[in-house]
Image (spheres, helix red, strand yellow):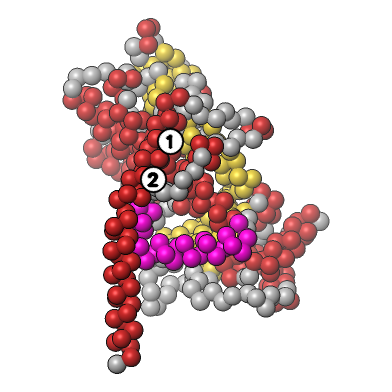
């Protein structure tokens, strides 16, 4: 993990080293207008009183992308009625273990995640109900520190009671203080069925005040990545639930693929902004992104469920996956690359379509070749996964069984 500011500084440094005379950075500028040239041979941007024109505009301008709206590209998906609270956390260094392990706890309202940055700092991503997120942001930083520690350590029932007390105090205009939260935790009942959590992230000592923010969570996918003289990348093309930590990876993979496609078009003497010159980008990225979006969406609903049978299947399933290398490798394929998640379950067309848009979302379901291609790839990965993994799974399961048997024999000697 690295903080966004550090990544931006590294990119700017790289531009200074290799982009002199090639890259023109316009800071504190705003695009006032976009316009296609005669015959669609170029696209222009009005920046202040100046017009800048070129062959292609890349929309890397976020989920409410003006470039996507200019290109009249629609988006489909749905909201989760959940907001993510983010912050930079401070904690003491561990004298024995480096801070290199991420932690994520799945709560009924959404996951709370601890993502390491350095030996003494980490990132918080707490997905919760909008009213909880608003109340958390209004707490003092000492009080928020106590709530974050509670989010990782308290049993669900006790944490729910604490959140209810926080909302009640907030409604009366007197947010809970850090001492009040400590007192409440000490007095709230702990269910007898509460299980121990032996592995926990470091205790948070403080929170960096300017870093606290929140944003609504939703899943969305543009119906196309290409418009007339435009291309969409990252959040402008797709948004994803943060539980898998793949949003940035997917965006970086988009940029890498588009750059490679444009470089090949330039090498062949083609038109960089034409559909012919850019078609290789969505051909590669759209199905893979759809697969990751669809899989993460399904995981979100699985982890929110609190049915005993679902809990057992969820826990047992991940234990089995951890022992079966081929399946584990597919599920982990996206970590760090933004691609690779697949599923082998048989689903109907309606279940495969993750765009369950509600009327108030104002989103339309996808259609046409992008969805057909994405669904086709999803089905192909499922079929290929089933056929290709059977022998590997059986072999690895047997090896794991033999290894455990050998360990048991050694233990008896």
Left or right of 298? Residue 25 is left
Residue 142: x, y in percent? Answer: 62, 65
Residue 388 vertical position relative to residue 38 in the rendered view, above or below: below
Magenta stretch: residue 290 in it?
no
Camera-side residue of 30 and 261: 261
Camera-side residue of 60 and 142: 60
Magenta stretch: residue 324 in it?
yes
**Residue 15 lies in what quarter of the image?**
top left
Mark carried by residue 382: 2
Mark closest to the chain's N terminus, 1 or 2: 1
Residue placed at 34% from the left, 11% from the top? 41
Q: Which residues are magenta?
A: 305-331
Residue placed at 72% from the left, 65% from the top? 161
Residue 263 vertical position relative to residue 351 in the rendered view, above or below: above
Give the alpha-carbon distance from disc 1 to disc 2, as whole Å.
11 Å
**Residue 250 lies in what quarter of the image?**
top left
**Which residue matches tag 1?**
375
Residue 159 vertical position relative to residue 367 in the rendered view, above or below: below
């Amino acid at each position: 993990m690295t903080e966004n500011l550090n990544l931006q500084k590294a990119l700017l440094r790289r531009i200074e080293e290799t982009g002199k005379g090639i890259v023109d950075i316009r800071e504190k500028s705003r695009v006032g207008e976009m316009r296609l040239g005669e015959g669609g041979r170029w696209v222009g941007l009005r920046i202040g009183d100046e017009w800048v024109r070129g062959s292609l505009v890349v929309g890397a301008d976020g989920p409410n992308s003006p470039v996507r709206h200019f290109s009249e590209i629609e988006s489909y998906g749905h909201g989760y009625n959940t907001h993510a609270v983010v912050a930079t956390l401070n904690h003491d260094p561990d004298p024995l273990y480096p801070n290199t392990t991420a932690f994520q706890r799945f709560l009924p309202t959404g996951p709370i995640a601890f993502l390491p940055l350095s030996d003494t700092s980490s990132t918080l991503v707490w997905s919760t109900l909008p009213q909880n997120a608003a109340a958390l942001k209004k707490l003092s930083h000492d009080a928020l520190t106590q709530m974050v520690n509670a989010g990782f350590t308290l049993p669900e029932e006790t944490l729910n009671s604490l959140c209810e007390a926080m909302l009640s105090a907030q409604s009366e205009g007197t947010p809970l203080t850090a001492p009040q939260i400590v007192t409440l935790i000490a007095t709230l009942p702990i269910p007898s069925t509460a299980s121990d959590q032996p592995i926990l992230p470091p205790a948070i000592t403080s929170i960096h005040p300017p870093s606290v923010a929140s944003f609504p969570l939703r899943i969305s996918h543009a119906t196309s990545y290409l418009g007339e003289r435009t291309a969409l990348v990252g959040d402008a093309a797709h948004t994803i639930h943060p539980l898998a930590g793949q949003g940035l990876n997917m965006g970086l993979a988009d940029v890498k693929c588009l750059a490679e496609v444009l470089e090949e078009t330039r090498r062949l003497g083609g038109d960089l902004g034409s559909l012919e010159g850019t078609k290789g980008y969505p051909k590669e990225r759209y199905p893979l992104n759809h697969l990751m979006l669809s899989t993460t969406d399904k995981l979100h609903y699985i982890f929110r469920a609190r049915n005993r049978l679902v809990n057992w299947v969820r826990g047992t399933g991940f234990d089995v996956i951890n022992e079966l290398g081929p399946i584990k490798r597919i599920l982990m394929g996206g970590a760090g690359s933004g691609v690779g998640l697949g599923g082998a379950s048989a689903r109907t067309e309606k279940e495969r379509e993750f765009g369950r848009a509600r009327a108030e979302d104002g989103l339309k379901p996808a259609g046409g070749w992008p969805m057909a291609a994405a669904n086709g790839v999803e089905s192909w990965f499922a079929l290929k996964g089933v056929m290709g993994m059977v022998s590997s799974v059986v072999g690895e399961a047997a090896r794991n069984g033999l290894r455990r048997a050998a360990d048991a024999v050694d233990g008896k000697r």
